[in-house]
Amino acid sequence: MLRWAAAAMVVFNGFFPAVWILFTSLKTEAELVQKPITWWPANPMLGNYVKAFTDQPLLQYLKNSLLVASGATVLSLLVAAFAAYAIARLNLRRRQLILTCIVASSMFPLVTLLVPIFETMRALGWLNTYAALIFPYVVLNLPVCTLVLVSFFQSIPRDLENAAMIDGCTRLGALWHVVVPLAAPGIFTAGILAFVNSWDEFLLALSLNSSPAVRTLPVGIALYQGEFTFPWPIISAALIVAIVPVAVLIALFQERVVGGLTQGGLKG
C-alpha cells in the first residue's frame, strides 16, 4: 500500500503542473482570477493558442529550438561516443581520475560559466547565431552523455570487437558496426537527456542570442508578459506548445529510455 501511495505522489507531482497549465490555456483571463477557483474551464476556448502564435513569432521560436536542440544532441552523442569508447576500452592511465573530472565538470553552476562563454562567442563572432548555443550546449551535455555511454560500452563483450577486427574491421569500424548498435538503448537515453537539456535551457539562450531570428522557445515565451500585464492563458498556451515536442519524443522512445537507464544502472 505504501508503494502505491508513493507512486501516486510521484505521478501527481509530475503530471499536475502540466494538467493545470493545460486547463489555464483554455480559460479566459477573467475566469482565471475569479473566486472560488474553477478547476475545469467553464467554456474551453482555443483562442489563446491563436494569440500565442500571433502575439509573438512562436513558430519561428519553435523552429529555432528544434534546430539548436537537434544539432546539440547529434554533436553531443558523436563526441561522447568517442570519449566513452576510449575510457571504456583503451588502457588509459588514471582512468578513474578522468571519470572524476568528468563528473566534477558537470557540477559548476551555469551562471559561473556565462561570462567566459559569452566572451568566447563574441571573439569568434558567433553571437546571434545558432552556433552560439549549439557548441556550449554540447559542452554542457558531454559529461552526462559520456557517463551514460561508458557504462553501456563496458557491458559489451570485447570478444565481439576482436572478432570484427580479425575479420578486417578497424577499431573505428568495430565501434561503428558492433558497439554502437549494441549500445542503442544507452545512445537513446543519452540523446533524450541531451535534447531535453538543450530544449529547456534559458540563461545562455537569453544572453547569447538577442536577435528574434535565432531566439529560442524558452526566451520567446518570457516575452509574452508586458511591464504591467501577465497574460497567463496565452503564456500557458505557449508552454503547452513547448511541452508537446518533448512529450511526443519521450512517449515514442520511453521503452528504450527506461531500458537504457535500468541497464546503465545495473551494468555500469
Image: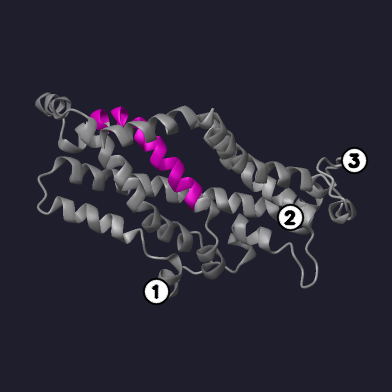
Query: Going 30% across and 40% down the picture, which residue do you hit?
Result: 149
Q: Is residue 167 above or below residue 174?
A: above
Secondary structure of the magenta portion, mostly? helix
Q: Quadrant of the C terminus?
A: top left
The image position of residue 67, as x and y in percent, is 53, 50
Segment tinted magenta in the rendering? 177-197
Query: Going 25% across and 31% down the picture, which residue do you hit?
Result: 179
How packed mark 1 is, by other alpha carbons closer than 10 Å (few <14, some 14-19, many 20 or more), is few
The image position of residue 76, as x and y in percent, is 37, 49
Residue 185 inside the magenta-drawn segment: yes
For label 3, the residue is 43
Q: Which is more foreground, mark 1 or mark 3?
A: 3
Cα separation, mark 1 vs mark 2, equals 32 Å
On the picture, is 73 further left or further right than 79? right
Type of the residue with mark 1: Pro
Quadrant for residue 214, please give it: bottom right
The image position of residue 247, as x and y in percent, is 59, 38
Q: Which mark is residue 116?
A: 1
For label 2, the residue is 235
